[in-house]
Amino acid sequence: MVVNLPKGAVEFLDELEEHSTEATVQSYRWAIRSVTEFQQQQDEDPTEITVDDVAEFILFEGSKYATTTLHGVIQSVSTYIAHTRDETPPYLVKQRINEAVRTLRKEIVLETGIRPSELDNPRSGSTEEAEHCEVDFIKSLVEYLRHCNYGSRTHAIVEVLV
């Protein structure tokens, strides 16, 4: 699937490249692209990313990612929204996203009786499947640390523990 970023996102990322590291720009690009791709899967034509779009992404795609990754998505996209709308500081947008997540979660539970985490949770299957997911997560974490944080305290601790 070809993901076309909203026009404001392209301009934001171009401006970000001028004063940020490549890793930072890639992180922002990935977060914005992920939410935009989710919008397109919902049969929407994303011209802008809204707070509600991010909340839906967090609830319905959240089981695929670690909690820290989701926090990163919220932080990156809230900075993008604040920057492109010139309305509020990123921390206020982040608060609005978190509030939208809580509200949407309550609505889903009230309507269906099912928690969003139960809809597509890879750990809800057998114990064997859960162990396989955990092993995959540990392998991907170690690989990430070897490539991106090699020699850091976190990398050393994880290598020793594994």
Image (tube, rainbow, N blue to C red):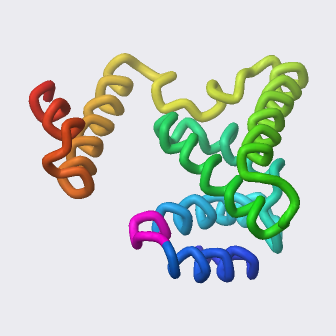
Task: Examine the rendered structure and indicate whether residue 138 appears above or below residue 113.
Answer: below
Q: Residue furthest left?
A: 160
In which quadrant of the rendered view does residue 120 lie?
top right
In which quadrant of the rendered view does residue 61 lie?
top right
Magenta stretch bounds? 20-25
Residue 65's x, y, as percent?
49, 41
Residue 54's x, y, as percent?
73, 50
143 inside magenta stretch: no
* SS assignment for the magenta stretch, majority: helix
Residue 140's x, y, as percent?
28, 45
Residue drawn at x 69%, y 63% is 80
> Can I make out residue 132 in this image?
yes
Total marks in image:
0
Residue drawn at x 29%, y 38% is 136
Task: Examine the rendered structure and indicate whether residue 27 appears above or below residue 25.
Answer: above
In which quadrant of the rendered view does residue 56 lie?
top right
> Can I make out residue 55 in this image?
no
Foreground pick, 88 / 145:
88
* In this rendering, position of residue 3 left or right of residue 105: left
Foreground pick, 8 / 136:
8
Residue drawn at x 28%, y 42% is 141
Q: Quadrant of the N terminus?
A: bottom right
* In this rendering, position of residue 49 left or right of residue 139: right
Residue 6's x, y, as percent?
74, 76
Foreground pick, 161 / 94:
94
Q: Quadrant of the C terminus?
A: top left
Residue drawn at x 26%, y 56% is 148
